[in-house]
Amino acid sequence: MTVTNTRRRVLVGIVVSVTALVSLVWIRNPVLGVISSSHHQVMKLFPRDTVKQLGITSEPETIQEMFPRDTVKQPAITSDTKPNIIFILADDYGYNDIGYHSKQYGGIINTPVLDKLASEGVVLENYYVQPMCSPTRIQLMSGRYQIRMGNQHKTIGHAQPLCFPLDEVTLPEKLREANYTTHMVGKWHAGLYKAACLPHRRGFESFFGFLVGNSDHYSHSVGCAGCKHGCTGIGYDLHENDMIADPKKWKGRYSTTIFTDRAIRIIKEQKEPLFLYVSYQAVHAPLQPPKDPAYNYKNISNSNRRKYASMTSYMDNSVGRIVDALKQTNKWNNSVLVFSTDNGGYTGDNSGNNWPLRGEKATLWEGGVRGIGFVNSPLIPPHSRGRVSHELMHVTDWFPTFVQGLAGGSLNGTKPLDGFNVWDTIRERRLESTTRIGIHFT
């Protein structure tokens, strides 16, 4: 095992299979052809000549190396009020499908809004999630590893009588204790077999979205189109709190559009401090692009890749609409926006691209668990903006970071958390000295 260059935090991944194969996730041997979680570790482990032969170079240290343009400077903002927290989660988003990575590795998908937000904030280049949807979402909501809750066995099926345990304290519940209004839009996928499992019963004051892992982007019907994992149950899945959303109103309207519209409505109507969790269906299968011709990628010959690119750029524009709404309502200067993916992209037919990482969604290779992530906020001091952070971070860290670091709330009443409050690491470049063992079971 290797101790990272920035913190004494050792994470070990374990694959449990019929053959009891054990495999390291977080630090892998580059000689075996696996991209390491930190190129800095590789540079230490191998002589320069060997590293050069392996084709490994050090990652960009500054935002200027990652973005070939000047960083837009923002004025320093101070506030005595609790900040709004906007968490945007993309679904099955490939590592090389965001502009600031694809510009390095030869991609062609345009994401100008995400690139700009990242370049003005803190890019998280050593950030890890789970290899599939449900485990990541459950860890986000609980701040705890999924193995502690029995949710380590891939995703929760449509008809599976399971949700993450009802005795777990959730992120929105703790934020409500800190006087936040809490709202969720988009994909839940953390269990639905009884009413107590639903987001409206797990701390969110409002919920507009769907409950299962995927659905048609226009009809909002559950089926198996584009799925690799087989589905059980077919039907309409769009909900307003605990009720079915009116099909006459919503059928035929694109999921990314209606979720963004609802997020903007919440921003305009709700009081501060606000916690808004926007969990996009994009860019998960089925590959159904928006009908707006402005997002056609006629230069891409592969049909699936062309659809995927269109969905990605439309999501990028939608994030920009959310930011614009925050600015128009004078909420932006007291907001923290986090963008994350739930797992790596699906390659092959679903057309995600994780280059230069090995693997894809549902694998424990870097391409499955190393996530896209960044934080943007006027509350980050100017000297800490416009940089790339190589501090090791995990999706479980958001729970204590939001509750304790941003909301000033208490973590009392939760079960022992696996995540850490990393707000000072993001805001002030302070290094953690915490030792942690992270275990991944699949």
Image: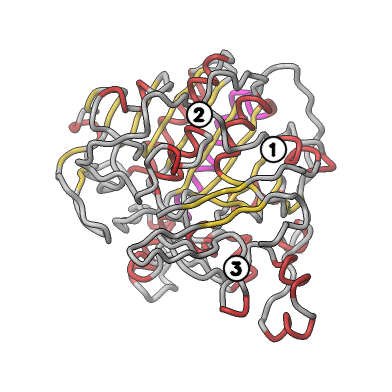
The residue nearer to you, when weighing 104 against 11, is: 11
In the displayed structure image, the side of residue 2 where residue 275 appears, left or right: left
Callout 3 environment at 10 Å: few (<14), some (14 to 19), or many (20+)?
Answer: many
Name the front one of labels 1 and 2. Answer: 1
* Label 3 secondary element: loop
Assign the C terminus to one quadrant of the image. Answer: bottom left
Identity, as a three-letter code, of the amino acid under mark 2: Leu
- Magenta stretch in the rendered image: 313-332
- The residue that appears at 63% across and 62% down in the rendered structure is 37
Name the front one of labels 3 and 2. Answer: 3
Q: Is tag 1's residue or tag 3's residue first in the polypeptide sequence?
A: 3
Identify the disc placed on residue 422: 1
The image quarter containing residue 311 is bottom left
Residue occupied by mark 3: 28
**Is residue 123 something one can see in this rendering?**
no
Q: CA distance from mark 1 to mark 2?
A: 20 Å
- Please name the predominant secondary structure of the magenta segment in the image: helix
Residue occupied by mark 2: 276
Q: Are marks 1 and 3 in contact (CB under 8 Å)?
A: no
- The residue that appears at 76% across and 49% down in the rendered structure is 386
Identify the disc placed on residue 114: none
- The residue that appears at 75% across and 17% down in the rendered structure is 80
Q: Are marks 3 and 2 in contact (CB under 8 Å)?
A: no
Identity, as a three-letter code, of the amino acid under mark 3: Arg
Q: Is tag 1's residue or tag 2's residue first in the polypeptide sequence?
A: 2
